[in-house]
Image (cartoon, helix red, strand yellow):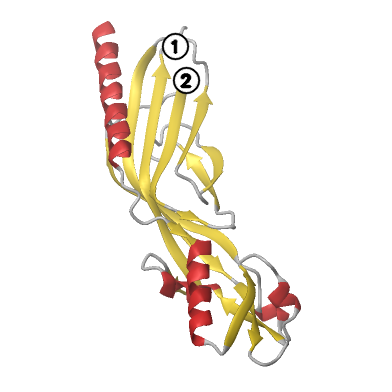
């Protein structure tokens, strides 16, 4: 038994090392800053319009309050529509367990920073199906890594069984609504409030797309599921 436990501990350490090594090698290759994309859009307006942008905002409801059709001009909001896990590898374990500790982490290599919350509710464990799942919530906005622990049963026995998986994940985030800018016209003091559908920002980054009248971004990264179960003291 001691040899088995020792071997499993080594396996766990190896998988955790591979995860840490993978994370250290991750290149943040498509991080998007939504305010920067908006600023680039406004710069284009300044170059092409007869006038100058007086101010702009991603978050204000000013455009909605001054619109003739306020129901059509909603403030911007973000939503995590779905998550996918793939390419999982690690130790498989298919037996029922009751006394366990779980460590779960999401490391992001392609994320987004915006003024909007992108909260997601996840049931853990994601991969291992033999424990009662627990609800965990966190915010993907500006997230590089998020970790949580969960506990089941009595954990005073000897650590003896291990389940480890590392997977790729994708979180599909959508943005809907309108931001605004005000433009001052040449030879007049008048200001015009201009609402802009958030989908217009798709032109500002190759990582932003449009589908079903929403701006879409896919967060990517690695997910680690590490579960340790204990011998019963009965």
Query: Mark 1–mark 2 contact, CB under 8 Å?
Result: yes
The part of the image, by quadrant, that contains residue 26 is top left
Question: Residue 39: percent from the left, percent from the top?
Answer: 52, 69
Dot 1 crowding, Cα within 10 Å, few <14, some 14–19, many 20+? few
In the image as oriented, which residue stretches furthest toward the front? Answer: 187
Residue, far bottom: 187
State the residue position of label 2. 99
Q: Secondary structure at mark 2?
A: loop
Q: Is residue 94 visible?
A: no
Residue 146 visible in image: yes
Residue in the image at 48% along x and 79% along y: 44
- Label 1 sits on residue: 232
Give the residue drawn at x 30%, y 23%: 12
The location of residue 2, given as percent across then percent down, is: 28, 6
- Mark 1 vs 2, N-terminal side: 2
Q: How many residues crowd around disc 2 within 10 Å: few (fewer than 14), some, or many (20 or more)?
A: some
């Amino acid at each position: 038994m001691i040899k088995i436990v020792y071997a499993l501990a080594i396996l766990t350490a190896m998988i955790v090392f591979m995860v840490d090594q993978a994370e250290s090698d991750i290149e943040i290759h498509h991080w998007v800053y939504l305010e920067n994309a908006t600023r680039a859009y406004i710069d284009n307006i300044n170059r092409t319009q007869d006038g100058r942008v007086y101010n702009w905002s991603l978050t204000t409801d000013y455009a909605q309050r001054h619109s003739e059709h306020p129901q059509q001009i909603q403030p911007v909001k973000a939503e995590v529509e779905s998550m996918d896990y793939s390419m999982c590898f690690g130790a498989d374990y298919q037996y029922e367990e009751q006394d366990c500790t779980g460590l779960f982490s999401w490391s992001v290599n392609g994320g987004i920073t915006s003024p909007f919350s992108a909260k997601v509710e996840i049931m853990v464990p994601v991969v291992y199906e033999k424990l009662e799942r627990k609800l965990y919530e966190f915010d993907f906005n500006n997230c590089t890594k998020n970790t949580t622990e969960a506990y089941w049963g009595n954990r005073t026995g000897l650590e003896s069984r291990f389940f480890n998986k590392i997977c790729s994940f994708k979180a599909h985030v959508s943005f809907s609504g309108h931001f605004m800018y005000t433009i001052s016209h040449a030879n007049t003091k008048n200001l015009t409030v201009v609402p802009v559908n958030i989908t217009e920002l798709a032109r500002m980054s190759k990582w932003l797309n449009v589908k079903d009248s929403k701006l879409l971004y896919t967060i990517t990264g690695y997910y680690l599921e590490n579960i340790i179960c204990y011998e019963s003291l009965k």
